[in-house]
Image (tube, helix red, strand yellow):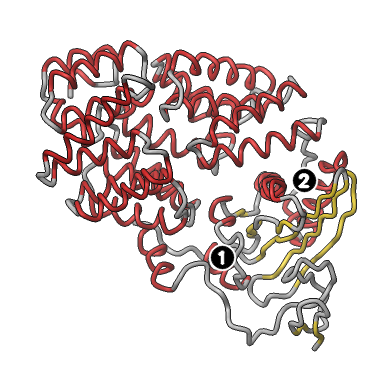
Amino acid sequence: MKKCPQCGREYDNTMSFCLDDGSELLYGPASMDEPATAILPAADLENARTAILSVSEERVSANSIAVLSFAHLSNEPDDEYFCDGLAEELLNALARIDGLKVAARSSAFSFKGKNTNVSEIGKALNVNTVLEGSVRKSGGRLRITAQLVNAADGYHLWSERYDREMKDIFDVQDEITLAVVDALKVKLLGEVAQIEPPTKDTTAYELYLKGRSLLYQRGLSIGKAIECFKEAVALDPKYAQAWAGLADGYTTSGYSGYKQAAGVMPLALEAARKSLELDPDLAEGHNAFACATMLYDLDYDLAEQQFLRALEINPNYLQARAWYGLFLLQWISARHAEADKEILRMLEADPLSGYANVIACFSYVSSGRSSEAVKHGKLGVELDPNSYLALWSYAAALSCDKQYEEAVAITERALAISGRHSWALMTLASTYAAWEKPDKALAVFRELEARSMREYIQPAMLTPAASAVGLIDQAIEFTKQGIEIRDPLFVMLVRTWPDYDRLRSEPRFQKIVSQLALPGWNAA
């Protein structure tokens, strides 16, 4: 046995890489009698397993891998997005190899910042190998280390260190990918195609990675993400992925209520079309165009074609699976059985994704399965406790399940981290109304109403809030506004979201909503 001179832990003689203290010295795997560290407490891990309905345990594939988020060893905290982006690009490259099962990004990245034993990671993700590493970035210089670990015994199959200039980042990605394939012997299943770099401008590439990282956070980070994407396409106007990211940024800002649709949705469509013009086989481009044309042009048939094309290109693209299953199939088309299949596919592919569980929570709230909604909402918050979207979905699920006191508590947490965003305020008004606290419900509605006089508040939130406190005429007026300004969230929620239940029997509401030409609406 050896001791690492930096961190003092014992290692055997097999060469490996010690990351405990950020040192870059090669040593063997940790002593096998060291207790494993779990990603979540035991009870929560059990929740994670049981919450995924109808998903049976898979046998570990002979050729399977999880790519973990690379450790960030630089002095600049803002460089962390680069570590995640590098790992994600490697994951995407490996996912293109026939015969190799690759764990989904969100599930693999859920171990970020946790000293979890690789055997626990292998069991949780049903893989037999784990790729991990680190990045140290200083100016234009990079030091990237990578190691491939056998999840069963903790021994290393391969490790390497790369000292490069930033301009060589794409060559390093190719080298790591080919080395991992060689170590796994997957190349026996077929040749690995050379992957063309998405851009030759490394600054644009960094901006794209940063933009995607910010966009995943949602909330107030959406605007920052848009700026990153705009800078990326300014540096490289032929960067298709960055155009798709810009389209998603505009669409997300529109349906999240940060910008009015007329100001951002045409820009989303333009950026999505540009992405597909540059790369007709880009899943991100098809998905971006699908969502934008669905929510603004109301072209539901074209949107479905585009979603399906995105999933044909990349079946593991979580965002496309979520938007297609929840937005189009369930919320807009009320094709619940098909939506259920998409939601379960999403959970099977990425069971430890907070976002996937949030989407499942929304789906079950919309179909009235409150206990399942609560289960996934709780898990979404456990996996991503700082996510506003997770907190809002969980609050909505608790309210649907008539757990009003807990719903209010969770809603208040969501309001605290979002600047009292209108989504959570609407749920708070609805919860108080259902809890038979009309004065409190009315006070929340009045807050929304007053704010709408001085800032943009989505009609999609004002409508159900007015309905909850019995102001049906006002709710109808807000419905008209939603149609007039083409509120994207209104398109999604009017059909199945439970806070609209009271209005759906109102003839005036039905007539106004018919202008959206929702599939089968007149027959509903």
Q: Secondary structure at mark 1?
A: loop
Residue sitting nearer the eye, 386 or 169: 386
Q: Of label 1 and label 2, which has the lower sequence position?
A: 1
Look at 20% across and 35% down and name the residue there.
Answer: 443
| Residue holding disc 2 | 192
Disc 2 residue type (three-letter): Val
Look at 66% across and 28% down and name the residue there.
Answer: 242
Question: In the figure, residue 442 lies in which quadrant?
Answer: top left
Report the side of 305 relative to 368 (left or right).
Answer: right
Report the side of 71 relative to 461 (left or right).
Answer: right
Residue sitting nearer the eye, 301 or 364: 364
The crowd level at tag 1 (other Cα within 10 Å; few <14, some 14-19, many 20+) is: some
Look at 50% across and 35% down and name the residue there.
Answer: 220
Quadrant that contains the N terminus: bottom right
The vertical placement of 16 against 358, above or below, is: below
Separation of residues labelled 1 and 2 (CA atoms): 23 Å
The vertical placement of 493 against 441, above or below, is: above
| Residue holding disc 1 | 60
Q: Secondary structure at mark 2?
A: loop
The vertical placement of 444 against 67, above or below, is: above
Disc 1 residue type (three-letter): Val
Residue sitting nearer the eye, 40 or 217: 217
Residue 444 in the image: state x and y as whole percent.
23, 36
Residue 504 in the image: state x and y as whole percent.
15, 25
Report the side of 94 relative to 251 (left or right).
Answer: right
Residue 487 in the image: state x and y as whole percent.
36, 20
The crowd level at tag 2 (other Cα within 10 Å; few <14, some 14-19, many 20+) is: some
Report the side of 95 relative to 52 (left or right).
Answer: right
